[in-house]
């Protein structure tokens, strides 16, 4: 199996992880607005811990967004820099997919509605469904990822599945999202954020499926620039 470095800097929590044949080690930092100072040193520390060089990596993964504009640029820049230097293939994965995968794995869920708080009274939304095979579990996006103004939340959630769970900090108890949405979500997990350790598992699946790309094609996605408001 490939040796994969995973980087997540999409939210206030910054983390890096090394996936070695399914054995995962992670370092994380909660220091606010310090991703530029923390990310690369954590990568170097993790590699040094296992007496590895960046050239030893078979692949690199980072969360492409949505999330903090600055954080996404930092994670992408570190990943691209290492990949360009050693001709390492890259996988980019949605931060909302990482959150959905966390919930599906930890709580044995079938469907999740991910809702991550954005700036300017907006929320990032996505629906995911668990995909199970004999060997592994993954998640599949249902529809599109969206950025939605809080005033438009009710229409964005029309037709929500009754067996879904709410995932992400926008579902916090007493928050505007939970107040506006009357659908019968069966549970809520507002404490789940993207983590590099979980990202590395999804990345391993994509690497093995041949879905890695050259560094020049591995770019963050700024959801607000890609989609119209719903």
Image (tube, rainbow, N blue to C red):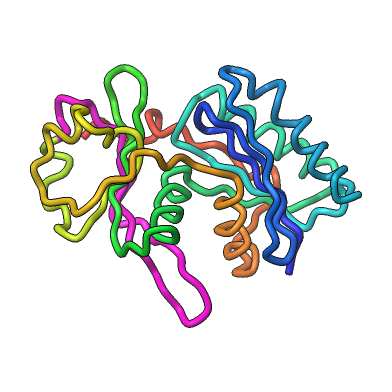
Single out the residue that lies furthest toward the bottom: 134
Residue 22: in magenta span: no
Residue 99: x percent and y percent?
Answer: 43, 47
Residue at 40% in and 54% down: 103
Residue 129: x percent and y percent?
Answer: 33, 61
Residue 151: in magenta span: yes
Left or right, residue 17 beside residue 141? right
Left or right, residue 44 beside residue 51? left
Residue at 38% in and 61% down: 140
Residue at 43% in and 50% down: 97
Residue 24: x percent and y percent?
Answer: 68, 56
Residue 7: x percent and y percent?
Answer: 64, 41
Picture quadrant where residue 44 is located: top right
In the depicted structure, whether residue 124 falls above or below residue 104: above
Task: Tell me which segment is drawn in magenta.
Answer: 125-153
Instruction: Work out which quarter of the rendered image holds the N terminus and state it.
Output: bottom right
Instruction: Work out which quarter of the rendered image holds the C terminus and state it.
Output: top left
Residue at 70% in and 39% down: 79
174 or 64, nearer to the observer: 174
In the depicted structure, whether residue 103 falls above or below residue 190: below
Left or right, residue 194 beside residue 23? left
79 or 135, nearer to the observer: 135
Q: How many marks?
A: 0
Q: Is the stretch drawn in magenta largely helix, strand or loop?
A: strand
Single out the residue that lies furthest toward the left: 182
């Amino acid at each position: 199996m490939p040796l994969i470095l995973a980087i997540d800097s999409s939210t206030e929590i910054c983390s890096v992880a090394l996936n070695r044949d399914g054995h995962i080690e992670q370092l994380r930092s909660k220091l606010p607005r310090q991703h530029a100072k923390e990310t690369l040193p954590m990568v170097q520390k993790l590699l040094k811990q296992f007496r590895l060089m960046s050239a030893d990596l078979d692949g690199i993964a980072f969360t492409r967004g949505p999330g903090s504009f600055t954080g996404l640029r930092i994670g992408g820049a570190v990943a691209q820099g290492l990949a360009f230097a050693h001709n390492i293939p890259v996988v980019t994965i949605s931060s909302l997919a990482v959150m959905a995968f966390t919930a599906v794995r930890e709580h044995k869920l079938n469907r999740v509605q991910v809702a991550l708080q954005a700036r300017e009274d907006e929320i990032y939304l996505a629906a995911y469904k668990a995909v199970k095979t004999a060997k592994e579990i993954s998640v599949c996006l249902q529809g599109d990822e969206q950025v939605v103004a809080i005033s438009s939340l009710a229409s964005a959630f029309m037709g929500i599945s009754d067996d879904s769970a709410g995932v992400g900090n926008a579902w916090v108890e007493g928050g505007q999202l939970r107040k506006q949405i009357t659908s019968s979500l069966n549970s809520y997990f507002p404490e789940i954020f993207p983590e590099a350790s979980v990202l590395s598992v999804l990345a391993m699946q994509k690497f093995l499926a041949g879905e890695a790309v050259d560094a020049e094609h591995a770019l963050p996605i700024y959801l607000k620039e890609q989609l119209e408001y719903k």
